[in-house]
Image (tube, rainbow, N blue to C red):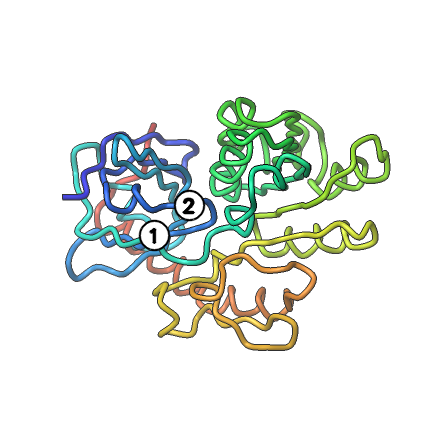
Amino acid sequence: MFTILTKTVLTPAIVQMEVLAPRVAASALPGQFLIVRTHPLGERIPLTICDYDRKKGTVTIVTQIVGASSHKICELEEGASFADVVGPLGRPSDFVEYSEEKLRNQRYLFVAGGLGTAPVYPQVKYLYERGVAVDVVIGAKSKDYVIFEQQMQAVCDHLYVCTDDGTYGRKGLVTDCVRELLEDGAVHYDQAVAIGPMVMMKYVALTTKPFDLPLVVSLNTLMVDGTGMCGACRVTIAGKTKFACVDGPEFNAYEVDFDEAIRRQSMYREQEVEANHQCRLENGQEIRK
C-alpha cells in the first residue's frame, strides 16, 4: 500500500504529498523520478522525486493540475493510497558520482521556475549536506505561486526570489537575476542547473552561454510512460535522438534543441485541458486549501 501520509496544497493548482514507498525511498537520488497510478487501470504519471526520507521510507512528490489524471492525483486525500508507485527511474544528477572533495571545491547556481522549484530542492539539499556552496534563483508569476521558499532557504547560501508582477522579491524574470549575478562577477560559479518551463530553460541557456558557464537542464516535463516505449519524450541532443526518461532527464543545456522540445511539449495541450475540464464537470469538485 502506497499510502499518502501528508498532503499540502501549495497553490490552487499544485499539491505536495508525502507517500509511503520504502523501496523507492531506499534507492532514490537527486534528479530521478517515479511513476504513479491512482488505480489499477489508471494512466501512468511520471513525477519527479522532490524529497525522500530513507528512515521513514517516504518520498515526496509535487503535482500540478494539467489534465484529468493529474487532477485525480490531487483529489486524493491523506490516508488514501496509490495503486502503484514505481521507481526510482531515470539517471540521477551527475554530481552524485563526484567525490565530496571535488564537490566542496565547486560552487553551484540553481535556477528554478514555477513547479521546477520542487525538483531543484533535493539537489540543493544533497549538495548542502556535503558542504557545497549553492545559490538559488526562484521564479514565479506572483507571490501566491512561490513554493519551497522556506525549505530552500535552509539549504542554500543565497536565495533570490523573482516574480513577474513584483508582488514578492525582485520584479522581473529569472534571467535578469542570473545575468546580474554573472556580470557582477563577485561570485564565481562552476556549474549551473535550470529546471522549469521549457522556454525558461531555453533563455537561461542563452543567458549563461556567453559566460562559458556549464549548464544542465531537466527535460522531465516531456515524459509520459517513463520507459522510452511511447516516444513522447524524444528529443534531439547534440544532433542525436535521445529519450528524456531513459537517457536523462538531465542534459547539457547547450546541446538541447529547445525549439523542437517546445513543439513536442505542446502537442497534446488542447486534449489535456479538455480532459481536465471534463473531469471537473463530472465530479463537481475543486481543489481547496
* Residue type (three-letter) at the residue carrying disc 2: Leu
Query: According to the image, label 1 marks what residue?
Result: 88
Packing grade of label 2 (10 A; few <14, some 14-19, many >=20) is many
Query: According to the image, label 2 marks what residue?
Result: 29
Residue visible at 38% across and 47% down in the picture? 65
Q: In the picture, which quadrant includes the N terminus?
A: top left
Q: Earlier in the sequence, mark 2 or mark 1?
A: 2
Image coordinates for residue 123, horizontal then vertical, percent: 51, 40
In which quadrant of the rendered view does residue 44 lie? bottom left
For the residues bearing labels 2 and 1, Cβ distance under 8 angstroms: yes
Q: Give the structural element (helix, strand or loop) at label 1.
A: strand
What label does residue 54 carry, if any? Answer: none
Image coordinates for residue 147, horizontal then vertical, percent: 50, 32
Q: In the picture, which quadrant includes the C terminus?
A: top left
Q: Between residues 129 and 141, which one lies in front from this camera angle?
A: 129
> Is 117 left or right of 206, judged from the image as shown?
left
CA separation in Å, label 2 and label 1:
8 Å
Residue visible at 23% across and 54% down in the picture? 37
